[in-house]
């Protein structure tokens, strides 16, 4: 039985997979079981930002493997404390604190729980708990019950009922729509500074600034979900550092440990001590091996690397703009750093299939949107290759219109 047959027999069929059985991955490349090589412009949905099997990160993992894998969160573990210190230093600074989880959804669950605890301490005039959370249409916050309920996309809400109350959905980049949803039970606003699954849409700077002011005025927590857009992808460590708008809480996961499961809730000083003993926990959260990987990742995330991300992004987007001039099927290019979306008037999945056949891995979060999430180790040559394949794909699909 080959991998495909075995998985069809034994794994729940929750993923619509592309026809690749991965044999190995290194840097910006993946090889399948037939030996075919692919240039990876997807990085496992922005997980392996520093390249597959990054030597520095992998050596930190190997080192920790022989020290200890797991001791339980009832004991101290140095890798957790080291990682948390680095995260705080690179973000809010003094007074902020971290809760460590295993995944993005879990990190967001933690943030949601924090918001609702905040709502127990800051009650309504009638002494009732506040609990309503405003999120956004088109958002994506995860697949657990609460994070799915927080996700502003109908298609996910149809899967299960009843959903967790009480999330309400505003229009992205529309401050009036947020204002209309605020009532005395509102406790927080949760937003991705760059909607990724929702179609690669950046928040407007002015909108985020107004959102911050609105939250301050109404004593609401502002939560940024940086799970896909954080960790250097935009050319700054965190997307909010581009906007100059500081949230009260932000969440990370995906590339925090460059391929090992790890999530984090980072809370600024005003609410850093909101959770007390027993309020939250996880057996595996902050696994020492994942934390050792995360620490190595954070140490590599220096200004030089971030500058490289911005420079590579400039080159790639310049090349995409050249393609846009040639192929009017490209309607819009949206990016911050190497978080790149291309809006088409073609069916994006046909382009994705074409590219896959030619050895280029990209993806499409929406019917007409292509998503490019290359690792930071890509070279000019890789980008030229991607542009060439994409051009061929556009030529082929345009001729079929
Ligand atoms: C913005 C955002 N939030 C949350 C999640 C959920 O993360 P995870 O799949 O690790 O639970 C994702 C995953 O794609 C995401 O993109």
Image (tube, helix red, strand yellow):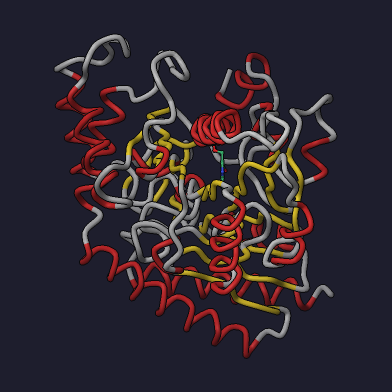
Residue 211 position within the rendered picture, expressed as x and y whole percent measured from the top left: 59, 62
Does residue 223 appear to the left or right of 156 in the view shown? left
The residue at 76%/49% (across/down) is: 169
The residue at 26%/25% (across/down) is: 289
Residue 246 in which image quadrant: bottom left
Does residue 227 appear to the left or right of 291 in the view shown? right
Residue 303 in which image quadrant: bottom left
Q: Where in the image, quadrant-wise, is ligand 1 located?
A: top right
Above or below, comparing residue 3 to residue 231 in the picture: above
Locate the C terminus and report the quarter of the image it occupies: bottom right
Residue 46 position within the rendered picture, expressed as x and y whole percent measured from the top left: 46, 50
Q: Nearer the viewer, residue 57 or 167?
A: 167
The residue at 52%/50% (across/down) is: 224
Q: Is residue 105 visible?
A: no
Residue 119 position within the rendered picture, expressed as x and y whole percent measured from the top left: 60, 33
Locate the N terminus and report the quarter of the image it occupies: top right
Above or below, comparing residue 327 to residue 122 in the picture: below
């Amino acid at each position: 039985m080959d991998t495909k047959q075995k998985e069809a027999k034994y794994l729940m069929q929750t993923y619509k997979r592309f026809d690749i059985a991965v044999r190995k991955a290194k840097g910006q490349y993946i090889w399948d079981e037939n030996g075919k090589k692919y240039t990876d412009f997807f990085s496992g949905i922005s997980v392996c930002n520093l390249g597959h099997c990054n030597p520095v990160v992998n050596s930190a993992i190997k080192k920790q493997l022989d020290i200890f894998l797991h001791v339980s969160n009832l004991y101290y573990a140095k890798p957790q404390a080291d990682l948390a210190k680095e995260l705080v230093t690179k973000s809010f600074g003094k007074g902020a604190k971290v809760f460590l989880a295993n995944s993005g959804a879990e990190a967001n669950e933690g943030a949601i729980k924090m918001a609702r605890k905040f709502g127990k301490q800051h009650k309504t005039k009638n002494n009732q708990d506040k609990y309503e959370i405003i999120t956004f249409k088109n958002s994506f916050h995860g697949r657990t019950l609460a994070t799915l309920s927080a996700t502003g996309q109908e298609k996910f809400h149809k899967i299960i009922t009843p959903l967790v109350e009480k999330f309400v959905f505003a229009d992205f980049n529309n401050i009036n729509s947020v204002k209309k949803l605020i009532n005395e039970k509102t406790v927080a606003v949760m937003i991705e500074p760059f909607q990724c699954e929702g179609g690669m849409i950046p928040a407007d700077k002015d909108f985020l600034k107004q959102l911050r002011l609105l939250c301050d005025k109404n004593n609401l927590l502002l939560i940024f979900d940086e799970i896909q857009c954080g960790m250097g992808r935009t050319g700054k460590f965190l997307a909010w550092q581009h906007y100059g708008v500081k949230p009260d809480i932000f969440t990370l996961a995906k590339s925090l440990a460059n391929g090992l499961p790890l999530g984090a809730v980072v809370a600024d000083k005003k609410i850093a001590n909101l959770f007390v003993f027993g309020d939250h926990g996880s057996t595996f959260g902050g696994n020492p091996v994942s934390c050792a990987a995360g620490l190595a990742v954070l140490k590599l995330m220096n200004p030089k690397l971030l500058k490289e991300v911005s420079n590579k992004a400039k080159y790639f987007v310049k090349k995409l703009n050249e393609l846009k001039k040639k192929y009017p099927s490209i309607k819009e290019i949206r990016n911050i750093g190497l978080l790149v979306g291309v809006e088409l008037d073609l069916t994006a999945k046909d382009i994705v299939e074409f590219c896959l056949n030619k050895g280029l891995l990209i993806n499409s979060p929406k019917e007409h949107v292509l998503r490019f999430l290359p690792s930071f180790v890509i070279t000019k040559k890789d980008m030229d290759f991607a542009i060439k394949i994409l051009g061929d794909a556009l030529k082929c699909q345009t001729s079929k219109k």
